Amino acid sequence: MKKMNNEKIKNAVQMILEAIGEDTSREGILDTPERVAKMYEELFSGLHTDPKECFSTSFCDDHEELVLVKDIAFHSICEHHLVPFYGKAHFAYIPKDGRVTGIGNFAKALEVVAKRPQIQERMTSTLANTIDETVDPIGIMVVIEAEHMCMTMRGVKKPGSKTVTTAVRGSLKNDSAARSEILSLIHQ
Ligand SMILES: Nc1nc2c(ncn2[C@@H]2O[C@H](COP(=O)(O)OP(=O)(O)OP(=O)(O)O)[C@@H](O)[C@H]2O)c(=O)[nH]1
Ligand SMILES: [Zn+2]
């Protein structure tokens, strides 16, 4: 994994604090540039990791029906304002040739992809493409529901508003009945 430049982040945060008129010598704020640099290392840890690595385990169990792993919580960062958006991701897929993937792999891939500055649409399609290329299922549908702090704490200020994005690959693209079943299972 490429290393982040912590020194650069520290200097930038120091400059922001100075620019907003803070007293950067006061005790509470003295270590803030360093803290933020450490935090960014965690929040953006997925930037140089390939989520395809998360799908290494699979099992052959003759299951060729729908599998839904739902309500996996995540936090990500909006690339426009660098504030969080957060919510839940749902993964539905139909295994090919009875080969199923480990259900925990969806949560691992979500963690990698969420830890990047981005928009929700790209996060959704990145996950769908990753699963399509590694698990190679008959069909896949990724649904993400999130609240964006750039829409709640600033700007239009609409707390509680949710954005829902979907990405569909394979057979589910032409199967509206299966997509409706997935959506009803998600919201059951
Ligand atoms: N499509 C999409 N838009 C997003 C996402 N996150 C934030 N945005 C929007 O990106 C837009 C950025 O708009 P700009 O006009 O460049 O920035 P701004 O003046 O700060 O915009 P406002 O947030 O509307 O005040 C805003 O409409 C945000 O609501 C996302 O995940 N997907
Ligand atoms: Zn934003």
Image (cartoon, rainbow, N blue to C red):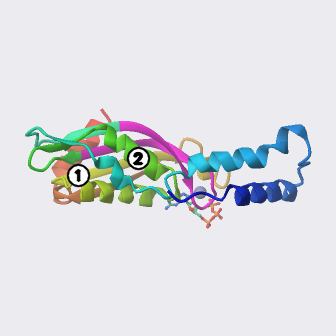
Q: Position of residue 27 (x, y in %)?
A: 88, 38
Q: Is residue 26 left or right of residue 47?
A: right
Q: Is residue 61 visible?
A: yes
Q: Position of residue 121 (x, y in %)?
A: 43, 59
Crowd rating for badge 2 (residues with CA inside 10 Å; few <14, some 14–19, many 20+): many
Q: Label 2 vs label 1: CA separation?
A: 15 Å
| Occupied quadrant, residue 8 | bottom right
Figure quadrant of the C terminus: top left
Amino acid carrying label 2: it is Leu
Q: Tell me which numbered mark, 2 or 1, is placed earlier along the sequence.
A: 2
Q: Position of residue 83 (x, y in %)?
A: 62, 51
Nearer the observer, 29 or 21: 29
Magenta includes 43? Answer: no
Name the chief secondary structure element in magenta: strand
Q: Which residue is mark 2?
A: 110
Crowd rating for badge 1 (residues with CA inside 10 Å; few <14, some 14–19, many 20+): many
Task: Identify the disc placed on residue 161.
Answer: none
Identified at 53% across, 60% down, the residue is 2
Q: Is residue 167 visible?
A: no
Q: Which residue is mark 1?
A: 135
Q: Is residue 156 left or right of residue 106?
A: right
Stretch in magenta: 71-92
Amino acid carrying label 1: it is Val
